[in-house]
Structure formats: structure tokens, C-alpha cells
Amino acid sequence: MSTLAPPVRRKSRTLALDLVDALSARIRAGQWAVGDKLPTEAAIMEEFGVSRTVVREAISKLQASGLVQTRHGIGTFVASTGDGGSFRIAPEQVATLRDVIAVLELRIGVEAEAAALAAVRRSEAHLRAMHEAQAAFARAIEEGTDAVAADRALHMEIARASENPHFVDLMQHLGDMLIPRARVNSARLAGQGRREYLLRVLAEHESVVVAIANRDPEAARAAMRTHLSNSRERLRRAQEAAEGASR
């Protein structure tokens, strides 16, 4: 029996954050180890007295922080205890376009190589998880949501497929900072509607996944570099425009 009490009923957003705190506390306390499956949505709803919407929002936030990974049709599993190394980029350090661009520059160097290694080392299970993330991304587009969780899931799975835990650790430390639109309105800055923007991102992701599936490290490295560089250049143009307007 857990000693962590369910949160008091408040607004939905506050309930979701309370639930995130409660579930992440259990993970960090070792009640669930890496690889353990979390209780079902129904079980969490019953224990904490919250709606399915609240549970899903909380799980999405845990995914964004790298603590859990959801496998479509199977369940949600602990991916990390949050006890990684000392490297941190705090949320307050990613407050401007310049900050977001700096994180993207770091990611280009790291993720291009992770994708190349994934093309060599990936398993069929890794590949299935990538396809699941792509399918979740496509569903999010059709549902009119931002697809941040699915986006992050794909990038995390590519890091896992590299079979180098340091890539995974770094990506987990970055958390929701992995996805620029979690911080800024990337579609608006690119001068596009959200659906059009996300469809382009989905196509860029597909190029990376196809190269990894084909076990082509050079193509995977190039596709990931192109994908992240495109994001960087869109934000860089927006930054230059904003700076020009302020002069």
C-alpha cells in the first residue's frame, strides 16, 4: 500500500501536476524500477480520484521528462529514475529564441551521430517503437494536437537504438526542451499553419526512420542533421527578423 496520498480535488491542470509529482516521486523512491509497467489508466483514476484526461495529461508530462515511455497497445513503462548525471539545462535557461537555437545546435551534434549508430545497432523492437511513435505523431496531427509527446518519443527511441546509454542520459536530461515547439510557436515562426508544419516534421522524421530501417548510417546521420538543421534555420530566421524589428 502506497504512503503517497491522492491529490486534493482542484482544477484539472493542478490535478495533473499533482499526479505528475505523486507518480514521479514513486519512481524516484524506487517503488517502480526501470522497465516496470505502470498501473493502468483505470487503476490510476480510481486511486487518485481523477479523470482519464488528467491521467493522460500527467503521463504525457512524465514522457516529456523522460521518466516513462508509452508503448502503444501495451502500456506505460518506467524509462528512467531521474537519477542521471549532473548535466542540466534548467528550464529558465531556455527562455528565448537564442536559447532554443543553442539547444538545437547541441542536438544536431549529438543526435546525428546517435541516428548513425542506431542504423547499425537497432533491433526490430527499436524499429517497432519508432514506427509506433510515428503513428502516434500522425494521430496527433489528425486530432489537432501538438504531437510533442510523440515527437519526443521518436527521438528518445533513436537514442536508445544507438545502444549507448550516454545518448539516452543526455536526451532525458533535456526533457521537453528536446522539442522546440514545447517552448515556442514553431509553426507561426515558420509562417505556416500547425497542420502543415507538423506534416513536414513527420516527413522529415520518416526519412530518418527509413534510413535506420535500411541500416544506412550515413543516410541516417544526414537525415537527422537535415531535420534538426531545418528547425534551427527556421528559428534563426525568426530571431533575425525580431532583432531587425527592434532596431
Image (spheres, grey):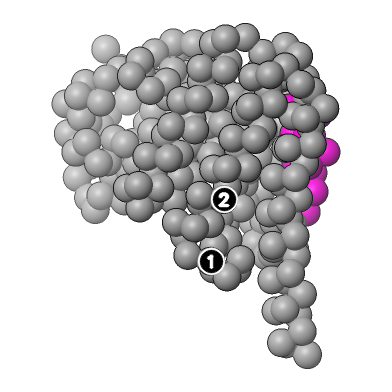
Q: Where is residue 37 in the image (x, y as percent from the top left)?
A: 39, 13
Q: Residue at x 27, y 41 (%)?
A: 54
Camera-side residue: 85 or 129?
129
Kindly indicate whether the residue at mark 2 contacts the one at mark 1 (C-beta within 8 angstroms). yes
Tell me: 130 left or right of 10: right
Q: Quadrant of residue 157?
A: top right
Number of numbered labels in the structure image: 2
Magenta stretch: residue 54 in it?
A: no
Q: What element carries label 2?
A: helix
- Magenta residues, start to end: 102-115
Residue found at x 54% / y 43%: 202
Which residue matches tag 2? 200
Q: Nearer the viewer, residue 225 or 152?
A: 225
Residue 190, position as x, y percentages in the image: 61, 66
Dot 1: what SS? loop
- The disc at residue 192 is 1
* Residue 88 drawn above or below residue 123: below
